[in-house]
Image (cartoon, coloured by chain):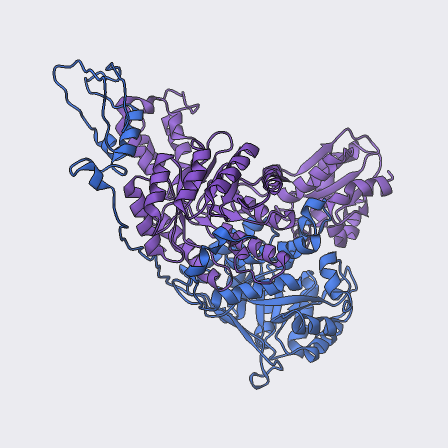
Amino acid sequence: MAEKKKGGLKELSPITIYKNLPKTNCKDCGQDNCMAFATKIVNREIDLDTCKPLLKPEYTKSYTILKDLLKPAVKEITLGTGDKAKKIGGKLVMYRHEFTYKNPTAIAIDVTDEMPEHEIIRRVQKTENFSYEYIGNTLKLDLIAVRSTSDDADKFKACVKKVSETTQLPLILVTLNPAIAEAGLMIIPKSRPLIYAATTTNWKDMAELAIMYDAPLVASAPNDLNALVSLAKTLQDYGVKDIVLDPGTFANDGLADTLNNFTMLRRAATKGGDELAGLPLLGVPMVAWANKGDMADDLVKWRESYIASMLITRFADIIILHNNDGWSLLPTVVLRQNIYTDPRKPVAVAPGLKVFGTPDENSPVMFTSNFALTYYTVASDIESSKTNAYLIVVDAEGAAIDSGVAGRKLTAEKIADAIKASGIENKVKHRKIISPGKASRISGEIEELSGWKVLVGPRDSSEIPKYIVDKWQP
Amino acid sequence: MISTTHHDTDKKTDNGCLQLSDEILSALAKFQQIELEDFELDAKELEILFTPSMVAQILPKLKLPTTPTAGSKPSSLLSTNFQLPIEKYPNKISAVKLGATKSEGGTRGKTFTIGGELSPAFYTFENTIPHKPIVTLDVFDMEVPLSKAVKMHVKDVIGDPAAWAKLAVEKFGADMVTMHLISVDPLLKDATPKDACQTIEKVLQAVDVPLIIGGCGDPVKDTALFEEVCEQFPGERFLISSVTLDMEVERCAKFIKKAGNAVLAFTPMDLNFARELNRRLYDNLAHEDIIMDLTTAALGYGLDYAFTNMERARIAGLMGDQELAHPMSSGTTNAWAAREAWLKMTADWEPRELRGPLWEVTTALTLLLAGVDLFMMMHPAAVKTLKDVTNYLTSGKKADPAKFADWVKVKA
């Protein structure tokens, strides 16, 4: 596979950056010197504009060179304005092991201009209030897609007005009719909604609207990449600044073409430096709702959800969904969080003794693995119940409980050693330790090696508080 | 057209050049022509200097007016071709056959071959998929903790592995069955390898698909179990699941080879361990006998590591790292270790009967896109979707662009 990359991370060395810096070593950026700043720049840990001298007119040339060197393979585009504006694209690489993906896939939920007003408000509020706490992150939804199913300018205006009064989330105006799009834009002329969409037939009118309202515009050419890049090129030359590509999303038999199109566009952008392919990609999992026939709604929701997940894995920068049920959105938002985490971050937390609340000499003692996800889950369950307890975090080489026991990363020896090293023997009078239910297999060995009595606790940490109330006796 | 009312030359810089303000530059980019009204400039000699960087800033948006500005906007659709980004890879993934028919020395009615890929997962714009990924359903030889959503489908057959296997194949569409012989675990029932072989015999009678033989996780007991299995059932081309670095790898490889079986090489999320284990297996086994299990973590509980590990392994294999150029298996059942798969949550997130299997299928499809060839799964609905999607992705049928825009106006 070609490693030729635009703004490629591998070829970009701190020296290349350093050469173009003012070399004042002024420390205004917070770094010790310009070389340290250059290293941070290469790792994308600091913004170029933090270098104040570089912004002076005499460094315009260097600034431009640096900007070009650092230009992402996929252009970054901002949708909406203000606090809830959403950035999409900005990707540097194709695969997440090459570098952390930037700007998690933005998720839009739709409303239509033929829904009753209370339904519109309810859907918008549900989208805005969607929230799931997951290992220290709040998972949220990002945009509202307003579709014109009526093709009636007044109805669309009323709907856009209602939505924009209800939420600060950025909007996507969905209609292929430029007159309808314009009606919507007139309601929110300064909000920079994403306009969906310019096609090979309506492109000129849509381009005029995008320029007049300074709004980003989707170029849509279903399953035809030649038409898509032609359209993008035309819009660009016409003067449209921010363009999003829609190669079409197809359920069922069309899935193969869908994945191929997303993959080819992203590879052309990241490995081939193709600037027309280097624009954010839009996926529309809600195609599951068109042509659904007599399929049960739950099955359509299921299908929409898995298409969304596949597109998140395969490079979509923004997706539009119809269903807003929690059960089907949860896998999607958790997957997005997973795919967009920093692959360099350690999976493990530091082993040792953790104290919850104000435990005393009779308080329960538990152990768990140092796998970050296991630890945070257990810790949040103990914390939220306000239980006073000690938790010994055992170095299981970052494995979860069950795979740690099965793969012998979490062994009785390690647990016995961790109990000793923790100093817990001086903190409690009793000698009882609660084991995760999934480590029950090795409880006998732990008792032999540590001399502590092992109480086999629940298989899931959500039941720890109840277990302690019901069963704990020092 | 815009108007400005600048009366000054405040942007004049030290060297006497006129700096165009950001507003004017962006206006230039947008409108391509600016008329300055009420504009006075006090200068003896006016020279508008475009530094190369300024030109570079403007150029992408603005054709400098060598031709009339109106003409620089295209009036009809331009035509440009998308360059297909096709790559060539020096290596391909080995293909592994599982199961053996009567004429091949076994007793199975059907066999499967997996692997053989020439490109990353489903890059079908580059190469077709030589062998479809397949699904094996878990069957246990004793009672195990199962989540409610799964248990409701198998509760009548728990404790009867033959009936469970039959249900998995005939009702749930499993391509293969994984017989987990956990009763041999010294910490559970400590059943003998001979007892376990009787279970296998029953399952072989009940279904005609290839089998995966799963151990209990104890390295010593599993070695004894697998040795007995290989002696009693030569020629069946079982997949022995699994051999790990803390077992007697060479001894296992020998008896597996002698019986003509294939091996699942299991390592905990580290490609260096995977390479090491494969190297040790190569002394006795061929590349065509080895499938890798690089460890599957659940969606929300480390799936990102599993995904990236597998994607890297597949790309490395194609790029010539022979030690990683093996088909991959995933213990997708691990998806149920995520509490979101089974936990009763508040009404907003229910029903869990749908959330759970969707959790499993999301885990499976993510890893499908990393290159997994063999899925060990649990829930019938998740199995059905995985099979549907692999069928869609390998059908060779095209998307119908005429239908796409329907979503814009659909009244769902």
Q: Residue A404: x percent and y percent?
A: 66, 51
Q: Residue B172 vs residue A2: left or right?
A: right
Residue drawn at 61 percent across, 59 percent down? A299
Q: Quadrant of residue B404?
A: bottom left
| Residue A419 appears anywhere in the view | yes
Is B208 above or below relative to B62?
below
Which quadrant, please, contains the N terminus of chain A? bottom left
Q: Chain A shown in which color?
A: purple
Q: Quadrant of residue B197?
A: bottom right
| Residue A272 appears anywhere in the view | no
Q: Residue B193: x percent and y percent?
A: 73, 71
Task: Return the residue nearer the eye: B275 or B284.
Answer: B275
Residue drawn at 52 percent across, 38 percent down? A158
Query: What is the residue that sits farthest to the left in this orientation?
Result: B45
Q: Residue B242 vs residue A235: left or right?
A: right
Q: Residue B300 vs residue A391: left or right?
A: left
Task: Return the residue nearer the eye: B384 or B199.
Answer: B384
Task: Return the residue nearer the eye: B11 or A264.
Answer: B11
Picture mark count: 0
Task: Return the residue nearer the eye: B280 or A36.
Answer: A36
Is A44 above or below relative to A10?
above
Q: Residue B212: x percent and y percent?
A: 63, 70
Residue drawn at 53 percent across, 67 percent down? B290
Which quadrant, please, contains the C terminus of chain A? top right
Q: Which chain is blue?
A: B
Q: Quadrant of residue B29?
A: top left
